[in-house]
Amino acid sequence: MSRVLYIDARSAGAAGDMLLGAAIDLGVSPAQVRKALEGLPLSGYRLSSRRITRASLRVRRVHVRLDGDHHAHRGWREIRRILSKSGLAPAVRRRAEAVFRRLLEAEAEVHGKTFDSVHLHEAGGIDAIVDVVGTCFALDRLAPDRIVVSPMRTGFGQVRCAHGVYPIPAPATALLCRGVPVFAGDIPGEHLTPTGAALLTTLADEWGEMPAMTPETIGYGAGSREREDDPNALRMVLGHSGDVVEEGAGDEVVVLEWAMDDIDPQRLAHACERLLEAGALDVTTAAVTMKKGRSGHALTALCAPGDFMSLSDLVFRETGTLGLRYRRERRRVLPRETARVKTPYGAVTLKVGILDGEIVRAWPEHDECATLARKKKVSLEAVREAALRAYRELPAKKRLARKR
């Protein structure tokens, strides 16, 4: 049994505030979101969250109120600096970074600029940063094992942006939607914003209709526009899938493979790091012998279907390969949770694998152990053993601190 989150962007499209509102409406405390956001080196805003009635439906409206004018145009370095100083959990920070990286890559392509030189306008504002980070934090608290997103409504017509009047979907939104299902719908206006598109294409494990599941909670996140006969709200459904898995069910991933005999070790390591930062689920390398007896490397990357185009583009840019192979496969992953333990060297997080309700694997986070080992001038193994010992001594009910 696994937790499934279905995001319905069919009826109203998606924007950052709608996604954050729906996630809070599922049961995440607004106070917890505000506390997580307090670590961001940002000021001059207030996050409000309240339930309102739209077209006779109770929905959650969140709004970032800015104190004065804020017109900062932020690039990758500035956004990454903000996130690095946030104090967020590593998983939340990595997910937020992946969202902004997708946004910046799309903007760079639209305007013909390099990734490091492009800046975000509306999507780089305080309200957009709060929406993205808040949504990533809330989903980390909800801890679904799988996120399924419906086809997304884009709307049609024209929209005024910082650079002028553009057709809907806006150019960056259109690029973000490559390889995923979208439709215009029958109501004019912008229904899918760049921030909403970046969040959903980063978060989605699968695309399609609501999967077979048992719903537990349902949340609605309201958009800013009000209509008489339309709640203009994005819906999220959180539930669990059954124990019986039908043929073809499960996580779908895209496997990318390519081999190279002319890449130096530093560039290879950098490329693997960039792919993981951009949302790859896994990246592996293996030494191989290629044609004419040349030593080379075989590389394999896994990604969600919605990330295929952006990650394959990144492969070409970062490795210099002229081609790659790809295929869709299905995978099964154990539900994972985390536990936090205290050791003589400091606190350590452990990843915990669950099978049929039983713990089958618990292992300390390497980066935390390595940091403590350097700080305390002890071996890495000493910190690992201390963490495992502390975990085994925990009462059974405390061995699963929170899901991830």
Image (tube, rainbow, N blue to C red):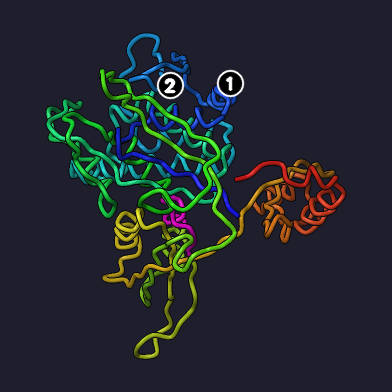
User: Which picture quadrant has residue 31?
Assistant: top right
User: Which picture quadrant has residue 79?
Assistant: top left
Residue designated by label 1: 31
User: Which picture quadrant has residue 98?
Assistant: top left
The quadrant of the picture occupied by the N terminus is bottom right
Q: Secondary structure at mark 1?
A: helix
Tag 2 near tag 1, CB within 8 Å: no
Identify the disc placed on residue 56.
Answer: none
Asked if residue 274 is among those painted magenta in the image, a careful observer would answer yes
Q: Secondary structure at mark 2?
A: strand
| Structural crowding at the residue carrying mark 1, measured as other residues with C-alpha within 10 Å and reported as few (<14), some (14–19) or many (≥20) | few
Asked if residue 229 is among those painted magenta in the image, a careful observer would answer no
Q: Residue reaching furthest bottom?
A: 292
Residue sitting at x 38%, y 67%: 328
Residue nearest the viewer, comparing 210 with 329? 210
Amino acid type, residue under disc 2 in the picture: Arg
- Residue 135 in view: yes
Residue 315 horizontal/vertical position (percent): 34, 62
Q: Going from the N terminus, do you reach mark 2 or mark 1 first?
A: 1
Residue 159 horizontal/vertical position (percent): 16, 28
Residue 188 horizontal/vertical position (percent): 16, 30
State the extent of the magenta-drawn residues as a range. 273-283
Q: Residue reaching furthest top?
A: 68
Residue sitting at x 28%, y 45%: 176
Residue designated by label 2: 58
Amino acid type, residue under disc 1 in the picture: Ala
Residue 182 horizontal/vertical position (percent): 25, 46
Location of residue 178 with respect to 99 vertically, above or below: below
